[in-house]
Image (cartoon, rainbow, N blue to C red):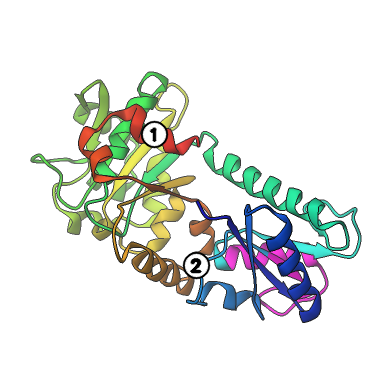
Amino acid sequence: MRGRRIGICSRDPDYAASLMMALNRMSGGAIEAVVYSRPEVAVKCRVVQEPDMILLDGFPDPEGNEEDPVRAASGWSRELGVPVVAMTEEPSEQGTLFKYQSVRGICREILGKLQSERKSGMQRSGCIAVFSPLGRCGKTTLARALAAAEADRGGLYIGMEEYPDRTVRSEVLYQIKQRSPDVYEAVAREIVTEGGISCIHLSGMYPDLRDVQKEDLEWFHAQLLQPERYRTLITDVGAAALAGPELLACYDRIYMPLPRGEGVEAKLRQFREYMRERKQGEVLRRIVPLELTAEVVERGDPRELLSGLSA
């Protein structure tokens, strides 16, 4: 397993080169450090894979403001969709990394921040999407496993697939578009129980789903997550069902199952670059990639499917 890739962006190239060599030498393989001339280069470079984190030293935010290093790091993090940490010359600023401490101390802080990022992304949330730009990756199987895990705590599986494996005649989509106060009652009428999972399928054809806008979905989620209704919504989102990538911003967490195979990483890079071009870096921060083998998907064991989420 490769080390965590850390991009270093510093206006002092000598410091950046020295820190890179020291981290690679002293981290015991836990970190692979690389140097980028500017933060935006870090996610466009095709020589190495995308970094897990960027250390930002002395660069302004994406709008060119230089006053606050913490705000600059936050701005680049939203823009690029990867964690960005400001390096400072004082050790007291919360959330930053003191650049003149020992290399071992920097290693510990980097790995600790990465672990915190992962734990934050794994925390419970009301709206979960399972989505992948790649086909035949186990998306629906994973979504159903998540819904099964949430079944006893008020979980609801929502099908937004391109073509569900059943005939769907639903009035819920119409009620969503009309912002009908009776939408919850319509959902309750159309729910079916499959393998102990409460399920609803919004449409049998993806063109119908493409009429749903971000504001519609946010309103719909708010109706379902009211007290005494549902606690967790797990939506199986087909790539063709999205009118635009901004709809993924309706979800607190997005699980992205990925198959193994040649070309997967290249396709994933293209998707990430597309999202950044559409200013959806914040959505990328919410994505939790999960590699699933064909054998795991075929077996469909919920515990096996979900084991990688807590690793």
Report the amino acid beneath label 1: Leu
Q: Look at 22% across and 52% down and name the residue there.
A: 136
Q: How many marks?
A: 2
Q: Mark 1: few, some, or many residues within 10 Å (few <14, many ≥20)? A: some
Query: Which SS class for mark 2?
Result: loop
Pick the front one: 195 or 18: 18
Query: Which SS class for mark 1?
Result: helix
Q: Which residues are magenta?
A: 55-79
Q: Position of residue 128 (x, y in %)?
A: 42, 41
Pick the front one: 207 or 87: 87
Q: Look at 71% across and 61% down and name the residue there.
A: 25
Report the amino acid beneath label 2: Gln
Locate residue 9 relative to residue 300 in the image: left or right: right
Q: Look at 23% across and 56% down and name the residue there.
A: 135
Q: Nearer the viewer, mark 1 or mark 2?
A: 2
Q: Is residue 284 visible?
A: yes
Q: Which residue is mark 2?
A: 49
For the residues labelled 1 and 2, the Cα–Cα distance comes to 25 Å
Q: Position of residue 90 (x, y in %)?
A: 91, 60
Locate residue 18 relative to residue 80 in the image: left or right: right
Q: Residue 64 lies in magenta, yes or no?
A: yes
Pick the front one: 172 or 135: 135
Q: Which of the two labelled residues, at mark 1 and mark 2, occupies the earlier sequence position? A: 2
Q: Position of residue 118 (x, y in %)?
A: 57, 44
Q: Is residue 125 above or below residue 237?
A: above
Q: Quadrant of residue 91?
A: bottom right
Label for residue 213? none
Locate residue 20 relative to residue 281 in the image: left or right: right
Q: Position of residue 305 (x, y in %)?
A: 34, 35
Q: Look at 25% across and 31% down and name the residue there.
A: 199
Q: Which residue is mark 1?
A: 306
